[in-house]
Every structure is written in structure tokens, then in C-alpha cells.
Amino acid sequence: MVEVHKVSGAAYDGNVYLVMAKRPILVDAGMVAEPTLKNIKKYVDPKEIETIVLTHCHHDHAGAVPKLKEATGAKVLLDQKEAGCIGDDFASVSYLFGQEAPEFKLDGFLAEGQVLDLGDWKLEVLETPGHSEGSICLYERTDKVLFSGDTVFPDGNIGRTDMFGGSTENLVKSIERLTKLDVRIMYPGHMEVTDRDVNRQIQLSLRFARSIL
């Protein structure tokens, strides 16, 4: 089993995960780089991180990209539908945090069906719009691991759909997709990691999302 460490450390930050595979990656970047880098250094030299994979463009998940990219030299990947949000205070919702959205350059795009080969894990890219137009999840089929971004959270919670690019109808369809997966452990974009009957928790998220259509 590949080790995964939650390395974000700032209040209100989205969760940042260090995936300690043969080719280490970060899933999301948060918005405050310094505590995240401090936590990363407990496990690995930041320069060993090859890729920063963003589940979506919102500021609490992507605001720290410029500093983390500088510290790691990692490639930054994002779904193409989210690329136009970079540097946009409204689309990235950085205004909600009283901050300006930073500009940064992408090194490639993520798309449905793409597989990120980390050596000992293969993360499948699932396009799961709803929280934002280009939100993604990442699924590791062998170990039944889901990085759910802001699509679903533990205990039947779901991502907001009332911001730029959000759609409750699309979120319902995306969560329906997730209910068809076998998930043993979920690494959400907020709240805590969970391995407690995760499939049931995702079913509860679907029920909640359908209730607000």
C-alpha cells in the first residue's frame, strides 16, 4: 500500500495530499505554501515530487501552486475546462478569502480516462463536474482509493454548487458515477480521510445531492 500523507497545515485550506509512490505527487496545493512545505519535508525532499495534480481551480486548492512549483520543480496538471479560471478572482473564488488569484502556467491537461502512472499506483482521472465545471476525482483501482476533491466528503456531505461553474444536476450525475466504484478509503478535499464503509457514505452523498435538485 502506497503511503499518503495529508500535508496541508493552514486553516481553511483545502486538503493537500503527498502520495509517496515511486513517482511522488501532490494532490492539490492548498492556498498557503509554507506550512505545506514544512510538512512535506517530514517525509521527502520537495524536489522529489514530480507532479502537482489539481482536482479543480478553486483558490483553497490551487492558490499555493506558484510557490510549491518553485520549491519542487513539479509539473502542474489541471482539467482543461478549469484552465480559464487561473488568475481570475471570481472563477477561482479567491475573493471569498480576501485574496487575489495568482497566475501560474500549466504543464499539461487532465482528461477523462487518463491514467497517471506513479510506478506502484495508477490513478485514473474521472471527470466529475458539479462543484465546478472541470472538477475531477482520482481513483486507484487495485487498492480501491479515491481522491474525491470537492465532489463528495465524508458522512454524506457534498461540494457546493452555488459558485462559478457549479451545477447541482451535474453533481448528482458525477456522484452517481462514484457510487459504481468500490472504494475502501477516501481522501476528500476537505474534512478527514475515511475508511469507514466508504461506499455507503458516497450513497448518502448521492441521496443528499438528489434532495436539493
Image (cartoon, grey):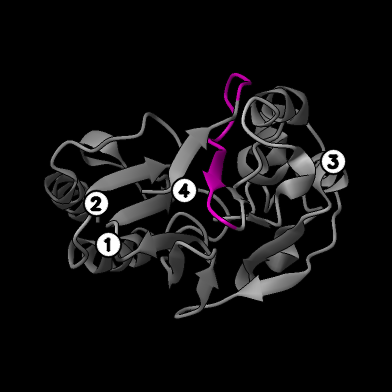
In the rendered view, does 113 fall on the left or right side of 74? left
Q: Nearer the viewer, residue 121 or 185?
A: 121
Disc 1 designates what residue?
172
Q: CA distance from mark 4 to mark 1?
A: 14 Å
- Residue to which mark 4 is pinned: 162
How far apart are the two marked residues, 4 and 3, measured between alpha carbons? 34 Å
Quick one: label 4 or label 3, which is nearer the N terminus? 3
Residue 51 vs 187, above or below: the answer is below
Amino acid, disc 4: Asp
Badge 3 element: helix
Amino acid type shown at disc 1: Val
User: Whole-Å distance between the Cαs marked 2 and 1?
Assistant: 6 Å
Is residue 148 in sight in this rendering?
yes
Residue 116 sits above or below residue 55 on the image: below
> Mark 2 sits on what residue?
209
Q: Which residues are magenta?
A: 9-22
State which mark lies toward you, 2 or 3.
Answer: 3
- The disc at residue 44 is none
Q: Earlier in the sequence, mark 2 or mark 3?
A: 3
Could you say where residue 145 lies in the image, as x and y percent from the top left?
A: 33, 53
The mark lying in front, picked from 3 and 1, is 3
The residue tagged 3 is 71
Residue at 21% from the left image edge and 40% from the top image edge: 156
Name the side, left or right, on which 46 lies relative to 58.
right
Q: Determine whether the residue tagged by mark 2 lies in a helix, strand or loop.
A: helix
